[in-house]
Amino acid sequence: MIVPLPRNARSGILHLALIGTAVWACGCGKGGSDETDAAGKTVLTVWDWHAADPSKGVGLWLIQIDREFERRHPHIKIKHEAQSHTEYYQIFKAAAAAKRGPDVVMLHQGSRILDLRDSLVPLTDYVTPAFRQKIVGWALSCEDYDPNGTPWAVPVAVQGLVWYTNKALMKRAGLDPDKPPRTWADFLNACEAVKKIGKAGIAAGQKEGSWGEWFINSAFFQTLTPQDSTRLNRGDLKWTDRKFVALLEKIKELRDRGCFQKGIMSTPMFPDAGEVFMRGDAAFFLGLISDVAHWKEFGEMLGPQNLGVMTCPVFQPGPNANKFPAGGGFAYAITQWSKHPAEAFEYIAFIASDENAKTFLSDVGSFPANQSYDAGLITDPMAKTIAEWLNAGRGGTDLLGRAPTSVNEALRREIQRVLSGQTDAAGAAAAIEKVAATARSGGTTRR
Amino acid sequence: MRDEGRKHRHARRRGWGFGRPKIGRTGIVLVLVSVSVTTIYPLLFVIITAVKDRKAYILDRYGLPTSPTLTNFAAAWTNAKVGQYVWNSAIVVVTAVVLSWIVCCMAGYALSHLRFPGRRAAFFAILGSMMIAPQVIIIPLYAMLIKMDLLNEYPGLILVYVTLSAPFGTYLLTSYFKGVPTELVEAAQVDGANHAQILWRVMVPIARPALVTLGIFNFLWMWNELLFALLILQDDSVRTLMVGVANLRGQYTTNIPLLSAGLFLAATPVLMVFMVFQTQLTKGMTLGAVK
Amino acid sequence: MSLTGKRSGVVFACLFLTPIFLLLITFRVVPGISAVWHSFTAWNGISPPTYVGLANYRQLLQDDVFWTALRNNFLLALAVPVWITVSLVLALLIHQEVPGWRFFRAAFFLPTVLSPVIVGTLFTALLRYDGPVNRALDIVGLGAIARDWLGNPATALPTLMLVILWCIFGHGVIVFLAGLAAIPREIFEAARLDGAAGWVFLRHIVVPSLRHVIEFWAVNLVVWSFTSLFAFVYVMTGGGPGYATMLVEYQLYLQAFESNHMGYACALGSALFLLVFGLIILQIRLMAGKED
């Protein structure tokens, strides 16, 4: 049967569609890595979430590294594909299930890496002892969280949580700007003083529940020893234990005393909560030490003379009370289906190299995992202080990076419930323990 | 809340019945106008915000813009990759709409004018499949698409959309085709046409209103669909517009004007389709509802 | 022989019905069966699944999050009569064909045309603590009730309900308008002559005449509320604060694609299916019951 020539719009559309269908059937649609391009070069596909904004910060740094690496290795071409942070792991898991995707992948250190180890290449043969020595933070990228175990990824950045203070605001509230509150009681009083001048004590963003998670990571050193944290994550210590519940109680206390700005439950952490702090509407902010919501950003907005830094106010004195979580920034791993693992590791090693560590600190304003940089070269006073703290050994591995994803999710939500008055500390802990118990019993997941 | 208030106010006025001209009518118009304000204002807000630059927005969030600018639209086009995503959406949706027409026309004709054993069963089977909610099948479907190598490929999402649209579309067209007098079909048969020719030459032209309605309806929901698009076309190069918009929040939350510009651009195709075909659609939407 | 007559009917029927059945079986039925099968396994989506029998269902029964989500779903379903009434009343008003009725019909339908993603993003911005809605309340002197609408667990779900109402009432208006158009004028005339007005008119004349349409729309809305609100939750609240706006549909997504508990998610899906199926049967029975 001969199909009549198009005489009206409808037939026309139909014809177009049939042609279109034929076209896409011939295989458009993307995904998957090409191993060699037309010029015979080896192509390495790299995934991360930072290069989505290549104009500044980490994104720019990464792109520049690509250029330099290609220059030094003319037979390798880097194909950089930035993914959205929001569903980064979902996308990667889909790629892993289909066994195609990037050669090199950026990952958050911690349980995420271990969850995905079925799709990664163990780096034991690639990581030399000298290399291992230089870089800090292996614990969160190695098997069993053992810094000497099988490494699944190479740490590149050191992330951490410190409390920032707005000195100008503190002065206005009648507080000594150079003496940030050290005890919990002092801290609560400081918040009250700030409230009296019409500002908020703490700027926080609880929409995704991150603030609660950060607070726990910042404060747990006071009640849990490193052994306790391992036991907690293994299930030998319960989340309903006094030592953990104390942390939740502190959160509740902050809420009951009205220390936060209004509307934290619908404020996202990035960048809104940071903005509240930068605008000078709150005196204290629990922030990061690298990349974003950190000393560089705040220093630029508030002026370095107005910015102060402190660790979590102490409510339970102890040997570890002055520690802050440091370690576990982003890391790079090699995927199992990659056809060029050796080149991939060369690339990763280059990113984590001494020279790039230097630029990471000076240009990006972030702390590299590679410790070979000269701390004396740091000019920013806050960064200097933090570096001094790191050198003095005040940095410690955080608590929640090693917890299973489902526990973290439950924890975030339970803290939201505490902060909105739906539950108390004990109830929240019980709920978290319930989820943890399911996760431990193998529940319905297979590792 | 506001709508409840309106309802009660109207109930008071209703004591005057529907016969009273002036005051009763004014009251009714007032109610309708207020509701229209709630539906139109949000869109206006988006447009007004989109033409402010970032500083202007921070200074005055809700007022009218003092110096409107179009830079946000340009920025949204590039930063939010609207230009790239809209193309992906267009390919997927247009293809799916056309394929859906084809599939539903054929099925509709078979169920309305062909005689064969099991016709009733087939009809109810197709209709019954609507009961399987998308959430139930989403995981095995996802795994299946990976195995079939259709993840991150346009055909993956297209076939899913066509499948999802098939039962309703078939139902609509079956009803409509049933209304076509059998004499026309018989006349064509006498002329020697086979069923394919009857479908193409007789049924389709007559069912044009239903087809247009179905097409618009499918276009609207497919263009706006989020869940399957989010899961099947994940790769940045094939991502659809709605997913791109949903993720604007993650990266550009500060820049509300930029976000608004992006939202507006995302809504434009649908709004255009709506404006042009509005009467058609509102008349046609009810083809299936009223027996 | 010529391709007409009974045999050709069967041949063409097979031909014409193949595409749709192929699609439905491949992309709906097979996954459906697969989902049920996987609900009896522990599976992370990548490695082969392990059979665990009824463990997932037992976990489901003890899962507080699931029961909270279910409760939220039922609360939403309870809002359906409100959604219907609003649409019905507005449809009646437009039916009067007051000046500008075509404009109103279009204006009401406008929100339906917008994607839930856009609606969600827009209203998240509008409903912020320092957003236009609270500002407007302040201006009209109702500043006292201003609050963090989506961040307050007490108001999060109702606010979500209202946003959804805003989104779909127009669709209902159109549906009811068509139904009203089908009612013979004489009934309206007779009612007016009899002096019936207002509430009486609504209850005893309009509603019975529109019964089929109302029931159709009610079933539609209830099923919709259980299966199609994902985009709203994803964009506006993420199920929070805490679990205040968690819905079964959203929990399924989280379990499957964030926590990788695919087997458990399949169990959730099967439970959801049974629920929706049951509701539909129930409502059809109710409709048939009123038929006499």
Image (cartoon, helix red, strand yellow):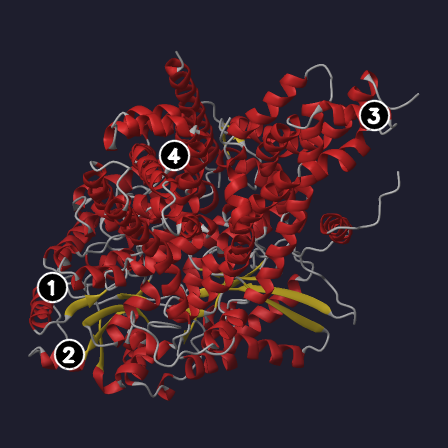
* Mark 3: amino acid: Gln
The residue tagged 3 is B189
Dot 3 crowding, Cα within 10 Å, few <14, some 14–19, many 20+: some
Q: Give whichever of A165, C286 is nearer the camera.
A: C286
Q: Nearer the viewer, residue A269 or C106?
A: C106
Q: Are marks 1 and 4 in contact (CB under 8 Å)?
A: no
The residue identified by callout 2 is A169
Reading the chain from its start, which is encountered first: label 4 or label 2? 2
The image shows residue A71, relative to residue A329, as above or below, that is: below
Residue A184 disc label: 1
Q: Is residue A201 left or right of residue C172?
A: left
Q: Quadrant of the N terminus of chain C?
A: top right
Amino acid type assigned to the residue bearing label 1 in the image: Trp
Which of labels 1 and 3 is toward the front? 3
Q: CA distance from mark 1 to mark 4?
A: 37 Å
Q: Are both tags, 1 and 4, on one chain?
A: yes
Classify 10 Å Cα crowding around label 4: few (below 14), some (14-19), many (20 and above). Answer: few
Residue A236 falls in image quadrant:
top left
Q: Is residue A137 above or below residue C85?
A: below
Q: Name the image quarter holding the C terminus of chain C.
A: top left
Residue B171 sits in quarter: top right
x then y, percent, for residue B55: 34, 79
- Please give the chain letter of the residue carrying mark 2: A
| Residue type pointed to by label 2 | Leu
Determine the chain carrying the residue at label 1: A
Position in image of residue C24 (x %, y %): 63, 31
Q: Nearer the viewer, residue A260 or C287?
A: C287
